[in-house]
Amino acid sequence: MTDYELAQIALSIGDQIDFLWNFYVTACAILLGWLFSSNISWDKDKQIALTVLFVIFAAVNLSAVYNSYTLFESALAQLRQSTVSNNFISEFANTTGIGSMAAIIVHLTADIFIYNIIKRLMYKKHSE
């Protein structure tokens, strides 16, 4: 595999990472907007169902983000080992973004924050 092909793969993985983050943020924004604007009576079954669905969604998205970052980091590590003297390849290989561990921290922080908002909104609307 040439450095050019590897750089193309890394760029494609970067696009996938962007898509996953955009999808996660959009889905969470829609969910929170719906919760804030709805007049649904949140009985215990509805609370459990929504909470379980959010946790599953967050876990699947987190796994996909982590796996994509891991692949991205692997491709960049391989590019750093390249003997080809190319400014773009060298610069690109040294940019990692936030990385897989930081992505996990950001994602989990947002998940916990959103989970707490969901619980408070549903509890508040359930008690009204």
Image (spheres, rainbow, N blue to C red):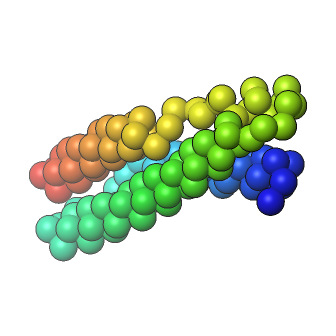
Looking at the image, which residue is at 16% across and 51% down?
Answer: 123
Q: Give the quadrant of the N terminus.
A: bottom right
Of residues 16 and 37, the one nearer the viewer is 16
- Residue drawn at x 40%, y 40% is 101
Nearer to us in this view, 36 or 90:
90
> In the picture provided, is 35 more to the left or to the right than 117?
right
The residue drawn where x is 36% and y is 60% is 59
Q: Let me know if residue 27 appears in the view.
A: no
Left or right: residue 114 versus residue 62 is left
Q: Position of residue 100 (x, y in %)?
A: 46, 43
The percent coordinates of residue 52 (x first, y second) are 27, 67
Number of residue marks: 0
Q: Position of residue 50 (x, y in %)?
A: 30, 65
- In this rendering, the answer to whether 59 lies above or below 37 is below
Where is residue 102? Give x, y as percent: 42, 35
Residue 109 seen anywhere in this rendered image of the structure: yes
